[in-house]
Amino acid sequence: MKKYLLILSLFIFSCEEEITLELPSSNNQLVVEGAIESGYPPYVILTKNQGYFDEINESTFSDIFVKDADSVVVWYVNDSGEKEIKELKLIPEIISDSLLSSDFPVYTINDINELINIIEDPGNYTFSAPGRTYFLEIHWNNNIYSSSTTIPTPTPLDCLWVEKNETAEKEHKCDIRAIYSDDGSIQNNILIKTKRLEHWRKDSLTGSAVNEPDDMMKIVDAGSDVLINGESFETYFPRPSENGFPTGKWAAERFSVDENNDSIFLPNDVVLVKFCQIDEPSLKFWRSLVRQSSTNGNPFAEPTNLVGNINNGLGIWTGYGSVYYQIPIIKGTVIFEQNKPEIIDIF
């Protein structure tokens, strides 16, 4: 019997053939991430797509950005039937670092006086207003890319409050909860993002408290009001994780104790909540992005195609009807008042 098994195994292994898959290279396409929201200037970030199996090295990040667009233009048609046009330019790196605190090139309005006014009086930029449809046109590499989006009318939350998370063992772990009353006369497409303006931790080297805020807005969820149309209901906004479904908690003030039993006081988080209305094409993109991120690297998850709204390219041009709330994570805090964040914090 052993002899037969040996002969059979030799036969099987002798039939093995090395297979080499020739994977097709990805076509060079422009990827657009652009936005315009009520009270703030439009901005666009341009990158080139990258193949799924392309090599990633130290130059990938810098090489992927497009800094040589021939023109980037945004306009809307006013009540007189005339175009109101803004030409977007690449912000000089020194201004981008100080104004936007970003490592990536951003196209936005290039009028210094307008930028100064926005910094001094955030949320009152009149070019961007609810109810208007905004057109985007990009000329790059002998191609034209275009899109359009509408800024919906913002719908505020009734109120928000902070309470201890019911399942967390640590007392400082909190939830942000809210009540929202949906307008039943229209379809509402909702996108929620959050950003920690303050998040304190103990530095392991110095032993002091250091503030490490979030670099950018992170998505909590996106969806329509189909199931809650016209209703008033309670919800909550968990902290988004670095990747995957948002399930995190927010931190109230606490004492951090190390292995030597030394303690240090850490202040509470301060969170900016962005509650948006978006149009239908934008919802399809952001909802599919949320679903894709929730797979969290699961190799058996079904891949999702991100359905953008860029003609001749990839990506999204979104109009946000936004309201903002700044929330200190202090148990029992109730927030009714809206916030007008600085331009650096809307990203």
Image: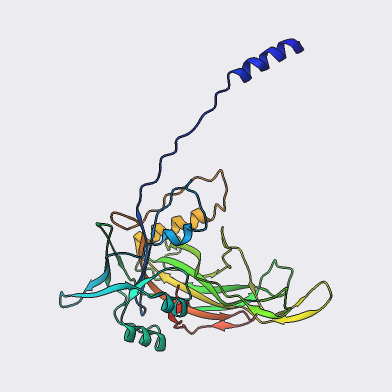
Q: In the depicted view, which residue is nearer to us: 309 or 328?
A: 309
Q: In the depicted view, which residue is nearer to us: 113 or 347?
A: 113
Q: Is residue 62 above or below residue 50?
A: below
Residue 285: x and y, percent? 40, 58
Q: Is residue 143 above or below residue 216?
A: above
Residue 247 horizontal side relative to residue 286, left or right? right
Dividing the picture into quadrants, the one containing residue 135 is: bottom left
Residue 120: x and y, percent? 41, 89
Regarding residue 156, the answer to whether it shows in the image is: no
Q: At x 60% / y 63%, what residue is drawn?
A: 247
Q: At x 20% / y 76%, what residue is drawn?
A: 78
Q: At x 46% / y 78%, what residue is drawn?
A: 344
- The colour style of the image is rainbow
Residue 46 horizontal side relative to residue 221, left or right? left
Residue lying farthest right?
A: 260
Q: How many marks?
A: 0
Residue lying farthest front?
A: 59
In the picture, the quarter occupied by the C terminus is bottom left
Q: In the depicted view, which residue is nearer to us: 188 or 106?
A: 106
Residue 234 horizontal side relative to residue 111, left or right? right
Q: At x 75% / y 81%, what residue is drawn?
A: 264
Q: In the depicted view, which residue is nearer to us: 90 or 88?
A: 90
Residue 55: x and y, percent? 50, 49
Dividing the picture into quadrants, the one containing residue 172 is: bottom right
Residue 175 horizontal side relative to residue 91, left or right? right
Regarding residue 316, the answer to whether it shows in the image is: yes
In the picture, the quarter occupied by the N terminus is top right
Residue 128: x and y, percent? 31, 77
